[in-house]
Amino acid sequence: MTLPAVRHDLTSLPARDRGQQDDSHNDWTYETGSAHRLFLGASLVFAGVSHLTIAREEFQAQVPESLPLDPDTTVLASGVAEIALGSALLLARRRRRAVGTFAALFFVAVFPGNVAQWMHHRDGFGLDTDMKRFVRLFFQPVLVALALWSTREPRR
């Protein structure tokens, strides 16, 4: 009695059974991160344009009084920075990690403005109660994390 020949074609086995790393999960998380990066970039561009146009006065409500710059100048400068960061998140290919780090640092830098808006009871963007302004403070760390996570390099 002879046994049938069994072909051992390793390429038909899942990667983990071939002794290789299965990157399908990494590819999915990288693609998800890319979608979040694009959303964050588009949001920053929109916010930056809003700084320069339709929401200029509302953004001035977030400028801390302790900042030794004119509130309008601060709003204009931060709007330009947001447009630049958002555009870089959308378009940069080689330096995505650096752009994500700069975006995260930007979100940290503007956090005192969010705190000032809460502490000085300033309305803006529908944040017309202390509770709404306080809850908003917790979204800034989410933006920092999103900027870093969505621009990380895929694990290979």
Image (tube, grey):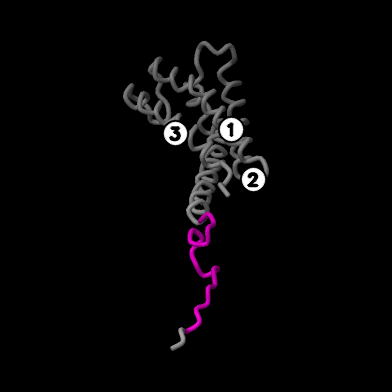
Q: Secondary structure at mark 3?
A: helix
Along the horizontal axis of the image, is 5 left or right of 124? right
Q: Nearer the viewer, residue 100 or 82?
A: 100
**Residue hosting label 3:** 142
Residue 46 position in % (x across, y down): 54, 39
Disc on res. 91: 2
Residue 22 position in % (x across, y down): 51, 56
Q: Secondary structure at mark 1?
A: helix
Identify residue type, mark 1.
Thr
**Residue that appears at 43% across and 19% down:** 115
- Between the C-alphas of marks 2 and 1, the distance is 15 Å
- Between the C-alphas of marks 3 and 2, the distance is 22 Å
Main SS category, magenta section: loop
Q: Secondary structure at mark 2?
A: helix
Q: Nearer the viewer, residue 100 or 117?
A: 100
Disc nearer the start of the sequence (1/3)? 1
